Structures are given as C-alpha cells and as structure tokens.
Amino acid sequence: MRNFGKLFVSLVCVIVSVVLITQLYGCGTILYPERRGQRTGTVDVGITVMDALWLLVFIIPGLVAFAVDFSTGAIYLPVVRSVRPARENLEG
C-alpha cells in the first residue's frame, strides 16, 4: 500500500511538471520576445488559440497566459512598414 502512495505522488509530480513546462511554450511572450512593448495592433490568431487552449485545460494558466500576452504586447502581430518610393524617383 505504501508503494502505491509513492507511485501516485510521483505520477502527480510528473504531470504537474509537464503541464507547467508546456505552459511556458504556449505563451506569446516566450515564443516572440521581439514583440514585447507593442500597445496595439492586430491580434495574432495563433497565440490567441494557444492561450485559449490553456483555458480549456486549466482556467488559471489560461488567464495568466492571456494577461501576460496582452500586458506585454506579445499577442499583437508586428507592424509591417511599407516603403514607398519618392515621387521624384517615379517621374524620372
């Protein structure tokens, strides 16, 4: 009976460790650190889906993932700046 208790505790520790480690990879802040600091923009659907999946699995990690991604700005797609040629170069 004691072996069953130790086995159960070990199994729970492994499951909790795996869940916490995979939580790190579901966060846009970890996946896209260059996006930090953005305040507005188009929301990245991929990051939103990953955060939403955490809501399905566990409520608290999902809320934390959304809170961290929105507060750091990592959930927003990067702004693409287009370069337009000057009018003088077009008329040339």
Image: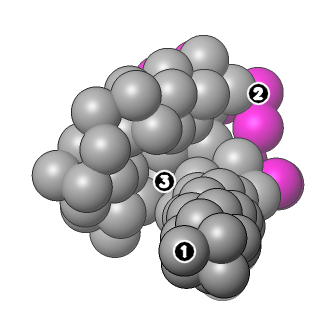
Q: In this view, does 33 lie above or below 38?
A: below
The verdict on residue 81 being magenta is no
How far across and down, in percent of the image, does residue 8 sit? 55, 71
- Camera-side residue of 2 and 90: 2
Residue underneath mark 3: 77
Considering every residue shown, the one lying at the far right of the view is 34
Callout 2: helix, strand or loop?
Answer: loop
Q: Which residue shows up at 37% across the image and 39% down it?
A: 62
In which quadrant will I find the N terminus? bottom right
* Front residue (pair 60, 70): 60
x and y, in percent, of residue 75 in the image: 49, 44
Point out the tag, 1 or 2, that comes first from the N-terminus: 1
Q: Look at discs 3 and 1 and give the one toward the viewer.
A: 1
Residue 21 image label: none
Q: Name the residue under label 1.
A: 1
Left or right: residue 57 versus residue 37 is: left
Note whether 33 is above or below 67 in the view shown. Answer: below
Q: Position of residue 87 (x, y in %)?
A: 59, 59
Magenta-tinted stretch: 33-43
Left or right: 45 with respect to 24?
A: left
